[in-house]
Structure formats: C-alpha cells, structure tokens
Image (tube, helix red, strand yellow):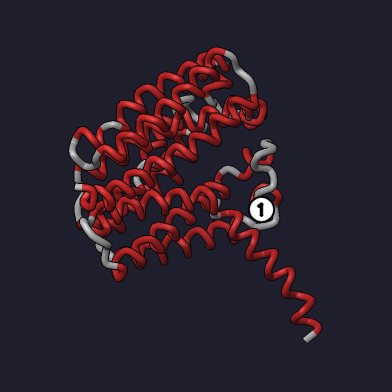
Amino acid sequence: MSQTLATSPQTASRWSQYMVLTKPRVVQLIVFCAVIGMLLAEPGWPDLRVALPAAIGIWLVASAAAAFNCLVEQQIDRKMARTAWRPTAKGELSNVQALVFSMLLGLSGSALLYLLVNPLTMWLTFATFVGYAVIYTVVLKPLTPQNIVIGGASGAMPPVLGWAAMRGDVGPEALVMCLIIFLWTPPHFWALALYRVEDYRRSGLPMLPVTHGAEFTRLNVFLYTLVLFAATLLPFVIGMSGWLYLACAVVLGLWFIGLAFALWQDYSDALARRTFRFSILHLSLLFAALLLDHYLMPWLH
C-alpha cells in the first residue's frame, strides 16, 4: 500500500506531462469549431452516434499533431520563455515517449473516424495532421515569415471536418467557415508575436516582427482584420445565417478592427496582448453567434 501511495504522485505527474504535449487550450478551440461545423451541417440536432465519435476522433488526431509539434520543436521551445516549460523542452519526456504517444493518439483517432464516422472525415483529418505537423512545423515555420499564413490552412479545417462528419461531403458553407478561420489566424498570431518578439528572435524562427519589424507587422494585423471583417459577412450573404449573426459579426468585427488600428497607430505590449486575447474571444463568439442564429432564426420567422 505504501509503495502505491509513493508512486501515485509520480504517475499523476507523468500523465500531466503527456497532457501538456496535447496543448489542451488550443485543441479545445479546434474541437469547438469542429462541433460548430457538425451542428450547422444539420437542420436539427445531429445524430450523437456520429457526432460523438467524430468529436473524440478529431480531438485525438489534433492532440497527436500538437504532441508531434512539441517533439519537433523541442530545441526551439527551450529558447523561448513561452514554451521552455514543455516536457519535451525540459527533457522530462524522451523523443521516443513523445513519438509513441503522438502515434497512439493519431492512429486511435483515425480508426475511430474511419469506423464510426466516414472515410472522408478520416482522410481530411489526416491531411490536416500532415499539414500542421509536417508541412507547417517542419517545412514552412523555419523557412518563411509567411509561415503562419500558409500554415493557417490546416488550422482552418475543423469546421470542414465537422461538416464532412455529418454530411459526408464538403459544402460551400463549410468552406466559408474555413475561410474565416484562415483569415483570422494571421492577426491573431502576429498580435502574440509582437509582444513575444524577443522570444522568436532568440529561437531563430523567421517570424514577421523579426524579419520585417514591428511597424510592418502591425500594419498587416490591421489589414487582415479588414479582410477578415468582409469574410465574416459571407454567411449572411450566401443565406447561411440571418440578421442575428450579422449584427454580432459587425460588432465583433468593428471591435477587432478598432483594436488593430490602435495597435498600428500607437504600439504597446499591453495593447498587443489585449488584441491577442480579444482575437480568441472574437472567433469563439462569432461561431457561437452562427450557431445561435442557426437554431433561433427558424423560431423567429
């Protein structure tokens, strides 16, 4: 009994280290967007016999991609205050442990999607894994300051995965949601990179604030919020949503533009941090409004 009690904290600590590799907060947003895609794909409530394994499968594969990212970037993570605490960077988990963990998550998630959802969703999710874990992390990130723009295509896929899980195809509505996340990613990430610029300079990664300076990056953040605002109006334009969503999209979009404009005109780390945090709220509330509109508008007519 005493031996069990002595080893249980160590076991708990080991599990917490594995959990850190999955980047839970990032994966939560991914699964949230995928679930929104599932819910919007059906006029009523989706079939839980499909939706539940789809959400779990997407969560597992997204967690596998995050773990693989931690494995590949451990040398870079050691140089950055934001990531130096990760178990792979600190050497608390070996390369083999991280790789096996990532493979187990990826294979189990893929099997779940293939057997209980549909092959299209499995292949799209696998392609997203390759896009993020290999093309973005290994190739693009150390190569070009536009890495986050090009690599953002993988991060924009969750609503498409959710839609495909329920419909077995990829509709224009899913692609519009994908476009919104794709255009949201650069201002979201560059706001973070602005106040973490010294971290990225030490890491050697060619992030935009390092290669082109803060002022150019701030201008890009502002310009992307303008394009993003136009994209967020598309669900209303194509008849995917109604006035409730439109009102929310306009308010959230103008708020984001206002923060980005202020950041461009008069920079401070505090404002960059505030813009980054609001960007997360922006996307979450935007998709929540899309969902609310989907279920409430038929009752309002």
Q: Amino acid at mark 1?
A: Pro
Across and down, in percent, residue 216 comes to 51, 14
Across and down, in percent, residue 90 comes to 71, 49
Across and down, in percent, residue 101 comes to 53, 62
Residue 116 visible in the current orientation: no
Q: Nearer the viewer, residue 26 or 267?
A: 267
Q: Nearer the viewer, residue 89 or 271?
A: 271
Position of 124 with respect to 272 (left or right) is left
Q: Nearer the viewer, residue 145 or 59?
A: 59
Q: Nearer the viewer, residue 168 or 133?
A: 168
Q: Give the residue at x 32% y 44%.
A: 290
Name the residue that disc number 1 marks: 87
Position of 292 with respect to 203 (left or right) is left
Q: Quadrant of residue 148?
A: top left
Across and down, in percent, residue 189 comes to 51, 32
The number of discs equals: 1
Find numbered disc 1 in the image and state the secondary structure of the residue it sits on. helix
Residue 280 visible in the current orientation: yes
Compared with 160, 108 (above or below) is: below
Q: Quadrant of residue 155?
A: top left
The residue lying furthest to the bottom in this view is: 1
Compared with 272, 241 (above or below) is: below
Q: Give the residue at x 27% y 53%.
A: 295
Quick one: quadrant of the N terminus? bottom right
Q: Give the residue at x 43% y 49%.
A: 30
